[in-house]
């Protein structure tokens, strides 16, 4: 382990400052985006509205696709900070910062302060990590608890620190309350694979007291949900977990889907992975082997799943970031000399530089075949231009100057552009203007009606539930649990009757369906707000007009 240096005492404050910049600066500026951010924010809001902390609700119907821990954390954030974008994203941002500190703590336990600091910097500046640390999903919270449990379990296995097992299982229990059985399956696979590959006994994995503690923490909610709704077990386990894993019915993707996704999430450090893994694969260091197994298990586990989404592989970033950081720290005090000895690093940086300059050239002067993929380029201006320029300059200057600081500075500058990217993208993904229009025009007796359209974020911003025509949505299971609920009506005549009986009905629909709606209603509507090809219109019923 490295001896202490004069700069070591600044590691944690530096990481905290970096995290505040990358994960919290302008966190509340972009509007909440559909579907994920709007969904999870609205579920947390309805916890307060319904005063029901045990059964999550969406559109005031039971929503049982996932366990409730992230909803609880978000609701507590709302309780302290109000219904704001910053409060909604705070649990993800805190989890991202916690993951950076976890990387530092684990790296220091394995190799010392300098490799730990470099690894934490690599993780904090991975573009995908910054993005997912700034949006409201379940994945960053899950990643923190899952990785914490895996790391503590490994220290217990490899260092004989038996007292860490209860803390490892506590973290995994919180992970299970965030997203379910994956928090149990992945750690067992990773720990077991490492023990087998290093020819050690599997007996240390037998921890009856920790298993009982895990069950005592997790089972009460699952038992309660099953007691309230007996069909919950079938829906949650068979449909939402085994069904998603074994069938492509939900988010079906090919086996190789995560190859480009992972390379994108690791940017700008992607180009150093061959240099890092090439040396690690031939090493007999059990710590490096464990980190490689950790990352590989996550990637393989989710690649085998028939249902895939990009954030699922987020837990693989931490172990690979530590491996990259350890290799960079291993260049020694004289980084220039270390660079000259590492032909693999020179080759990686050369490929990175060539790829960066090629990408910049193609972006500035795109050929015809690239025009369609670059359709979003004007929206992301000028951030994309700056990002590509830094991506090209960073390895080029590193090859010239031969200093680690050049790589980390370039990565930090690229990561600092992520908030701007998100703000730009939210313009096309957040219906905030519609929700705010609903709220500003709301009056007693009004009703919000989705005409073959539903938006979780509109509900959050307007603080109103949707009345809906019967059509396929994520609310169908909740609807089946509450027969005769007032939020759905299967027949068109019921919709017309509801609209005509109210002083004010606000319809949210596709603009192309407006003429059809007015024909059904037998009256004109007034446009209030527009979001992409979706509009919000008002309608005053015949009965209301006759008063």
Image (spheres, rainbow, N blue to C red):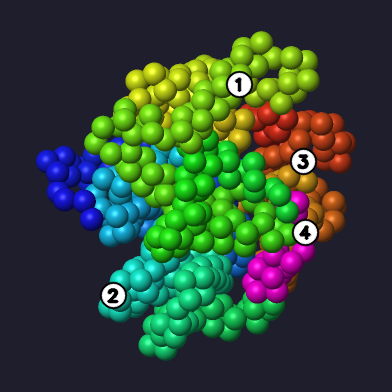
The 10 Å Cα crowd at callout 2, few under 14, some 14 to 19, many 20 or more, is: few
Label whose residue precedes the other's in the sequence (1 or 4): 4
Labelled disc at residue 248: 4
The verdict on residue 512 being magenta is no
Instruction: Please tell me in which quadrant of the rendered image residue 169 appears.
Output: bottom left
Q: Which residue is mark 2?
A: 161
Report crowding for label 3: few under 14, some 14 to 19, many 20 or more residues within 10 A (C-alpha): some
Q: CA distance from mark 3 to mark 1?
A: 60 Å
What range of the chain is rendered magenta? 235-254
Dividing the picture into quadrants, the one containing residue 160 is bottom left
* Foreground residue among 111 and 278: 278
Residue 534 lies in what quarter of the image?
top right
Q: Nearer the viewer, mark 4 or mark 2?
A: 2
Sequence-wise first label, 4 or 3: 4
Distance of label 4 from label 3 (alpha carbons):
47 Å
Task: Say which mark, if any, is on residue 359.
Answer: 1
- Say which residue appears at 31% left-offset and 30% top-offset: 337
What distance separates the C-alpha of mark 3 from that of mark 2? 74 Å
User: Which is more foreground, mark 3 or mark 2?
Assistant: 2
Q: Do the CB atoms of the residues marked 3 and 2 lie less than 8 Å apart?
A: no
Q: Of label 3 and label 2, which has the lower sequence position?
A: 2
User: In whole angstroms, how far apart are the C-alphas of marks 4 and 2?
Assistant: 42 Å
Residue 292 locus on image (x, y percent) = 49, 57
């Amino acid at each position: 382990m490295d001896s202490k240096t004069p700069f070591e005492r600044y590691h944690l404050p530096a990481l905290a400052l970096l995290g505040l910049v990358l994960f919290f600066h302008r966190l509340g500026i972009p509007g909440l985006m559909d579907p994920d951010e709007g969904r999870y924010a609205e579920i947390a809001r309805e916890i307060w509205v319904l005063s029901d902390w045990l059964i999550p609700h969406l559109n005031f119907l039971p929503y049982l696709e996932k366990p409730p821990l992230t909803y609880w954390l978000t609701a507590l954030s709302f309780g302290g900070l109000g219904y704001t974008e910053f409060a909604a994203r705070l649990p993800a941002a805190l989890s991202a910062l916690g993951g950076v500190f976890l990387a530092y703590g684990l790296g220091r336990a394995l190799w010392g302060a300098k490799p730990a600091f470099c690894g934490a910097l690599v993780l904090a500046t991975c573009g995908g990590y910054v993005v997912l640390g700034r949006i409201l999903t379940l994945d960053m919270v899950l990643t923190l608890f899952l990785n914490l449990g895996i790391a503590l379990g490994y220290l217990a296995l490899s260092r004989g620190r038996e007292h860490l097992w209860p803390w490892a299982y506590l973290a995994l229990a919180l992970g299970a309350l965030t997203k379910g059985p994956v928090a149990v399956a992945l750690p067992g696979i990773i720990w077991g694979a490492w023990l087998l590959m290093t020819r050690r006994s599997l007996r240390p994995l037998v921890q009856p007291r920790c298993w009982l503690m895990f069950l005592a923490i997790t089972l009460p909610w699952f038992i309660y949900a099953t007691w309230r709704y007996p069909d919950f077990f079938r829906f949650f386990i068979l449909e939402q977990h085994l069904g998603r894993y074994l069938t492509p019915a939900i988010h079906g993707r090919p086996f190789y889907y995560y190859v480009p996704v992972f390379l994108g999430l690791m940017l700008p450090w992607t180009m150093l992975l061959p240099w890092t893994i090439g040396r690690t694969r031939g090493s007999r260091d059990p710590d490096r082997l464990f980190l490689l197994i950790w990352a590989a298990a996550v990637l393989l586990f989710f690649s085998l799943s028939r249902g895939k989404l990009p954030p699922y592989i987020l837990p693989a970033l931490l172990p690979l970031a530590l491996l990259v950081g350890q290799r960079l720290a291993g260049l020694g005090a004289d980084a220039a000399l270390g660079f000259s000895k590492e032909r693999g690093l020179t080759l990686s940086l050369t490929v990175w530089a060539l790829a960066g300059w090629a990408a910049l050239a193609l972006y500035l002067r795109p050929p015809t075949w690239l025009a369609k993929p670059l359709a979003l380029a004007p929206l992301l201006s000028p951030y994309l231009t700056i990002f590509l320029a830094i991506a090209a300059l960073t390895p080029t200057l590193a090859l010239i100057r031969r200093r680690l600081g050049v790589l980390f500075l370039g990565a930090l500058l690229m990561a600092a552009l992520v908030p701007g990217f998100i703000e730009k993208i939210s313009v096309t993904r957040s219906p905030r203007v519609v929700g705010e229009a609903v709220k500003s025009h709301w009056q007693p007796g009004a009703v919000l009606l989705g005409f073959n359209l539903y938006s979780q974020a509109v509900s959050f911003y307007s603080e109103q539930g949707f009345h809906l025509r019967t059509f396929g949505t994520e609310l169908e299971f909740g609807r089946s649990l509450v027969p005769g609920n007032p939020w759905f009506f299967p027949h068109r005549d019921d919709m017309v009757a509801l609209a005509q009986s109210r002083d004010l009905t606000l319809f949210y629909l596709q603009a192309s369906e407006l003429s059809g709606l007015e024909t059904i209603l037998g009256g004109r509507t007034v446009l209030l707000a527009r979001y992409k090809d979706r509009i919000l219109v008002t309608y005053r019923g015949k009965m209301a007009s006759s008063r």
